[in-house]
Amino acid sequence: MPAVELVGITKHFGTVPANDGIDLAVERGEVHAVVGENGAGKSTLMSILYGLHRPDAGHVLRDGTRIRLRSPADAIAHGLGMIHQRFRLFPGLTVAENVVIGAEPARLGVLDRAEARRTVAGLAARYGLEVDPESRVGELPVGVRQRVEILKALHRRAEVLILDEPTAVLTPGEADRLIGVLRELAATGVSVVLVTHKLSEVLAASDRVTVLRKGRVTGRFVTAATSADELVTAMIGRSLTEAAPPPGKVTAEPYLLEVRDLRVRDRDGVPRLAGVSFGVRPGEIVGIAGVAGSGQRELVDAVTGLGRADAGQVLLDGRPVGGGRDRRVAYVPEDRAGRATAPGMSLADNLLMGAQRGFLLSMRLVRERAAGLVERFGVRAASVRAPIARLSGGNAQKAVLARELSRDAPVLVVEEPTQGVDVGAQEHIHALLAAARDAGRAVLLQSSELTELRALADRVLVMLAGRVVAELPAAEATDERLGAAMTGAAA
């Protein structure tokens, strides 16, 4: 008998079917991956399973018994837990306090901190989730914070864990450790539903895979008996092109973008950039690798004009970047909702940002321009008048790229271009970046995906503690060499 089963789940948003008669059974003690393109219906299905949405039709069974999920509280009461992409933790509280919050052990009406620490230490030992119960959450690495979220769900007696893109914010090493944790949890009888775009993780972590496309199930696979190619075909209806974009033809031209001895301190006077220097030539992609917090954010802010340097220079075609957003730099931020788009505004308005001239705008011309960009860059949207927040992650990312690449800017700075994006959209986005390079732009690409850097970059710079500690040609940028440089283990 499955631990949890979804039967005939159907959900519409307006006239659009997000889920169309989906059946999904998750066995006890298995890792079950759910994959599909952006907009395939994965998030809606998981939201229904966790009580965030109610289906139009269909029902959920827990250990063979039909249950009603009207809210996350109902889901928790039935032994379901969800680990969201954006952690829901209080950084000023300890690990133990975060884990037990809402279900605290009390003594004389107040939190029994000693019992909370013992409880969390016991849970951590039982499930192999190494963490110090007394540490402040705000001081922990991202990978450890994720363990805190898992412990929080387990403390509420979750027997089915839903993880939505759990490695999107993790380094490669942290992602590998998480996969080990998921396997250990499954061995104790916990059922894991893993939603991810990364097929390498699906193949490494899961026992079975369900593939969704356009709201329907298009494939069910035993992981050990399938391949990435077979999963891709079920996801997008075709095979991916075999070859990565061909490398660019880097010339000996002067740098179009040049960073000279850049130094940045934070508000507490702590160095975040400590003498960073490099250049990017026209027709070249330079990749930036590094564990989170190595100075990438401060570097990108300085290059785009969004941040101030304490010393050093950023030059574009020999001229310094001034204060404020520099129009000579097209910029695709990592944070789509916070920095890249205005979620409540229409797709057309978001595509116009940065291209306005004057005070009077013809809405007809705005929409015509938007429609042209949507067609040119393959953005799938019901209407350019709809809020951009309604687009899937991959299509929102393509919309941001469409806006920035359509600008007449010689330098392109891109952060995490395919984070949370399905394999079909990844292929399209990589082709767009390669085309920008081939058109003579200087491209600075920051990514936590080492395979992405190897596929696109002509050179890879590795940052650690605010410095560039290694520079490798793409042909020499192996996982081993990059990983060693990123952690300070390189000779």
Image: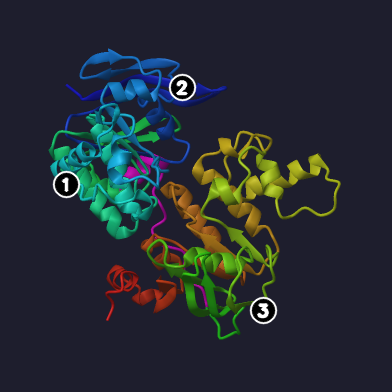
Q: Earlier in the sequence, mark 1 or mark 2?
A: 2
Q: Is residue 127 left or right of residue 281?
A: left
- Mark 2 touches mark 3? (CB < 8 Å): no
Please provide percent x and percent y for residue 224.
18, 44
Find residue 75 and report its image quarter: top left
| Residue extending furthest toward the front | 108
N-terminal-most mark, 3 or 1: 1
Could you tell me which quadrant the C terminus lies in?
bottom left
Query: On the picture, is 116 further left or further right than 286?
Result: left
Tell me how far mark 3 sits from mark 1, CA to CA: 53 Å
Residue positioned 54% across, 48% down in the render: 336
Q: Amino acid at mark 1?
A: Gly
Residue 385 picture location, percent across and down = 69, 35
Q: Is residue 245 magenta?
A: yes
**Which circle marks residue 128 in the picture?**
1
- Magenta extent: 228-249
Q: Which residue is mark 2?
A: 11
Residue that label 3 marks: 317
For the N terminus, the image quarter is: top left
Q: Label 3 amino acid?
A: Asp
Residue 429 visible in the snapshot: yes
Residue type pointed to by label 2: Lys
**SS under mark 1:** loop
**Residue 490 vs residue 107, the one in the foreground:** 107
In the image, 295 versus 192, the foreground residue is 295
Label 1, label 2: how far apart the Cα atoms are: 37 Å
Q: Residues within 10 Å of mark 1 (few under 14, many from 20)?
A: some
